[in-house]
Amino acid sequence: MELTNDDSFDPTPKLKSSPVPISFISFNDDDKSCIRCGDIFTETSDSNRQKYCKKCLLCYLTNITDKNIYLD
């Protein structure tokens, strides 16, 4: 006899991979400028001092036009 739960609920949404590449951050701490557009990185003011490219971040945000939830 197999037990089944008809009231099962999956709280995890159906995530997809983003069609727009995330190219506004660098994974190399030594990078001073964006590899995509050449602009100098902006650093966050918190203790992590993460670097990102403002121009590429703006392009990313304008290219994400749908309301889907993405994994990356």
Image: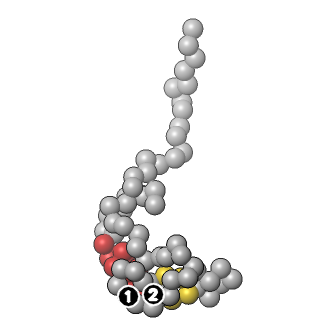
Q: Badge 1: how crowded within 10 Å, few (<14), some, or many (20+)?
A: few
Q: Badge 2: how crowded within 10 Å, few (<14), some, or many (20+)?
A: some
Q: Is residue 60 above or below residue 69?
A: below
Give the mark, 2 or 1, whose residue is nearer the N terminus: 2
Figure label count: 2
Please identify the quarter of the rendering in which residue 65 is found.
bottom left
Which residue sits furthest top? 1
Q: Residue 63 location in percent, x, y?
A: 30, 72
Q: Which disc number belongs to residue 52?
A: none
Q: Residue 26 location in percent, x, y?
A: 49, 76
At 39% from the left edge and 52% from the top edge, which residue is drawn? 16
Q: Secondary structure at mark 2?
A: loop
**Is residue 58 in view?**
no
Residue type at numbered disc 1 = Gly
5, 41: nearer the viewer: 41
Q: Which disc number belongs to residue 33?
A: 2
Q: Is residue 19 above or below residue 36?
A: above
Question: In the rendered view of the protein, which quadrant contains the N terminus?
Answer: top right
**Is residue 15 in view?**
yes
Please identify the quarter of the rendering in which residue 5 is found.
top right
Q: Which residue is mark 1?
A: 38
Which residue sits furthest front? 30
Which residue sits furthest right? 47
At 69% from the left edge and 83% from the top edge, which residue is drawn? 47
Q: Residue 46 location in percent, x, y?
A: 65, 84
At 65% from the left edge and 79% from the top edge, which residue is drawn? 48
Residue type at numbered disc 2 = Ser
Given contact means CB atoms under 8 Å apart, are the residues at marks 2 and 1 in contact? yes
